[in-house]
Image (cartoon, rainbow, N blue to C red):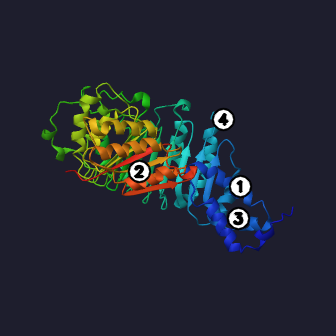
Amino acid sequence: MAVALGPLANIPLDVVREVFTHGIIYGMTVDDKEDRAELRTNISMVCRQWREIALTTPLLWSLVYISLARPPSHESLELALARSGTQNLDITIRSEGCDADEESGLATKAMKLLTPHIRRWKLIHITLDDLVNVKEVVSSHFRGTADALDEIFLCSEPESTSDPYAEVVLHPTFVAPKLRVFVLYDIALMKGSARLPKHFPALDELSLVRSSFSEAPGANWPKLMGILKNFKNLRSFNYGLDSEDADDDDDDDGDGDDEDDEGDDEANIDVSSLPSLPALEELIVHYMNLRGINKLLGAFTAPRLSKLEIASYQSADDEEERLPKTKALLGRFPSLGTLRFDDSAEAFDIENVQYLADGLERLEVANVDLEPLLQMFTKRVARSKRPIPRLKSLELHSEKVVPVSALRKLVEACATAGHAIESAAVHTTAECPKDDLSWFEGNLQNFNWTSVSDTYAAVWGSVTLLYGPKA
């Protein structure tokens, strides 16, 4: 069937090839891989010329997306891998609601075709319903050397697994010398953690989301840090508890009782005896209260730790009592400059947030309703028991209209209190009213309002506070 392309027919083939590559491969995210794989198929059906370009561009076929609910035939997957030539492969395998009785067989068939290309694996994301099937895929098909592998993501569905305590283990021969990112999501137990630095000697980012190692189950921080200290290049650690289990850590310090030793004098603790994570710069924790956070921070040292993020914070009645210890523990990290709260502002009292941020350079509060947050800051500027006189700059991001009136009142309150905000930047989908724009430009040394599309609005509401040097 002929297709009239008009002026498009006159575009040089090399340009068309580059457009296809940019549209399908570049800028790809985890969430749009299926759409991009479908786009690749669609453009190959437009006309004979486009089909020829698509089929002879190996980079386009480096994307391997397999839905087990709609599995490709053996022949089509084999042909797609052949078309990819020598390109490194971006692989995603997802169950997506396939029949539970068929998941294991379908995953195995796909992996049998992919395993011979293990030296070309660049990213491999496996999301299956049954943890037992994840275990089988990893133990049977992750073997040999994956020279180009940069990222591994393993995920299961706890409600669908046949054995929630199945232990995932890597084969002794499996090595990924360039692996930077390793993510376990709902992988209850992974065995063989002592060998992980040999499997992944260059590991940069580790995420354990509702996952743990068999050798350090639950939130056993001393044992876990004893494992992590062997990753000499580990820069980022992301740890997430199940929200229902956030308080279920009665003996996570491994001392045989359910006490957390809150009364210990921080000055008397021998910090040199703690495991050190020399390269760690970023720590992210999810679904934890101050009791758990204190235990974690007290279990290691990290001279380069510069950012702590607390996501989905779990409030507790004894928060005020534990704050001084949290503050003291933060002081153990000499490079710490940024404290971030994500989806936690409603659970964590804002005055306590300010108290913990005192002495730091940057406070970030994300996924929050901006107007009440700015109003709370304004009320506490002059009469708070923990004021913020060092606040020098603000940066706001919002998908919605920024509460300009609340922002103006905060700027006015700080100026009246004698510690004026010097600059502010706003990134939002809306335009700034002209009168307000003139007011901000007249009352701040620097003001920048950037209108962005919904695509580039970072979160539905976030504010970053930048502080001046401590007097």
Is 345 in front, or is 189? 345
Camera-nearest label, 3 or 2: 2
First in sequence: mark 2 vs mark 1: 1
Can you give x and y, in whole percent of width and height, for residue 123 in the image?
A: 52, 55
The image quadrant of residue 271 is: top left
Q: Which residue is mark 3?
A: 54
First in sequence: mark 4 vs mark 3: 3
Can you give x and y, in whole percent of width and height, for residue 16 in the image?
A: 69, 69
Camera-nearest label, 3 or 1: 3
Give the residue type at disc 1.
Answer: Ser
In the picture, which quadrant includes the N terminus?
Answer: bottom right
Q: Which residue is mark 1?
A: 76
**Under tag 4, what secondary structure?**
loop
Label 4–label 1 contact, CB within 8 A: no
Q: Sort mark 2 into few (<14), some (14-19) or many (20+) by Cα contacts within 10 Å.
A: some
Residue visible at 49% across and 49% down in the picture? 458
Q: Which residue is mark 2?
A: 395
Q: Sort mark 1 into few (<14), some (14-19) or many (20+) by Cα contacts within 10 Å.
A: few
Label 3–label 1 contact, CB within 8 A: no
Separation of residues labelled 3 and 2 (CA atoms): 44 Å
Can you give x and y, in whole percent of width and height, for residue 220 in the image?
A: 31, 35
Can you give x and y, in whole percent of width and height, for residue 93 in the image?
A: 59, 47
Camera-nearest label, 2 or 1: 2
Left or right, 99 with reference to 458: right
First in sequence: mark 4 vs mark 1: 1
Give the residue type at disc 4.
Answer: Asp
Is 281 in front, or is 7? 7
Q: Which residue is mark 4?
A: 99
**Under tag 2, what secondary structure?**
strand
Residue visible at 84% across and 65% down in the picture? 4
